Amino acid sequence: MDQGQFENILDFAIEREWEAVHFYHQLLQEAPSIALMEAIREIELMERGHIEALEQFRKAGYSRIAAPAVENLQIGEYLVPPPDNQTYQNMLITAMQREELSYKLYKTLADASREPAMANLFSKLAAEEAKHKNHFE
């Protein structure tokens, strides 16, 4: 994988994190209790932290780091269609699915990374996404 492809992967991951931020912001508006609102807001802030971590990784000069060898990320497998019925329950189910797919994306990137710093970043993000899924479950 060349640097341009890796740049595209980072762009995709950042875009997915922004989608998550917007999704959780919408879910926040539907939350039936203050306690649940606080929990959702916390996850929204964590997703914003993922964006910052990815951007910092890019700014740190990752061009000096060998890009992971990934033949086909099968990006389509990581997309979640919006729920047909926007009930709060369906939105929670969608949240679980989004977090599971985000976990898989970051796990795939971590496993494919030959550079320890890159693998560590993606492993950390994968673990956080798994925690988010468990929270919603």
Image: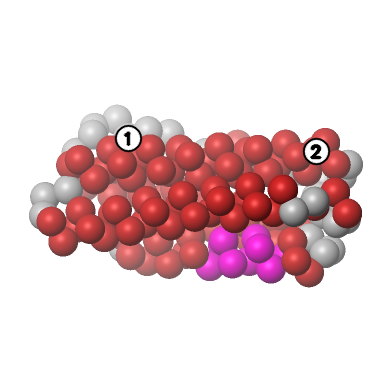
Write down the residue under mark 1.
83
Relative to 122, does residue 56 appear above or below in the rendering? above
Q: Give the residues drawn in magenta, as a range.
A: 119-127
Q: Residues within 10 Å of mark 2 (few under 14, many from 20)?
A: few
Image quarter (top left, top right, bottom left or bottom right) of the N terminus: top right
Residue 68, position as x, y percentages in the image:
82, 54
Q: Is residue 111 above or below residue 24?
A: below
Q: Amino acid at mark 2?
A: Gln
Q: Secondary structure at mark 1?
A: loop
Q: Could you classify mark 1 by the number of other residues whose Cα lies within 10 Å: few (under 14), some (14-19), or many (20 or more)?
A: few
Q: Is residue 49 magenta?
A: no
Tell me, yes or no, whether the two marked residues, 2 and 1, touch with CB atoms within 8 Å: no
At label 1, the amino acid type is Pro
Q: Main secondary structure of the magenta part?
A: helix
In the displayed structure, does residue 50 sit left or right of residue 99?
A: right
Camera-side residue: 2 or 49? 49
For image coordinates 82% across by 46% down, the residue present is 71
Mark 2: secondary structure:
helix
> Residue at the spot x=36%, y=40% of the render?
23
- Magenta-span inclusion, residue 120: yes
Report the residue marked by disc 2.
5
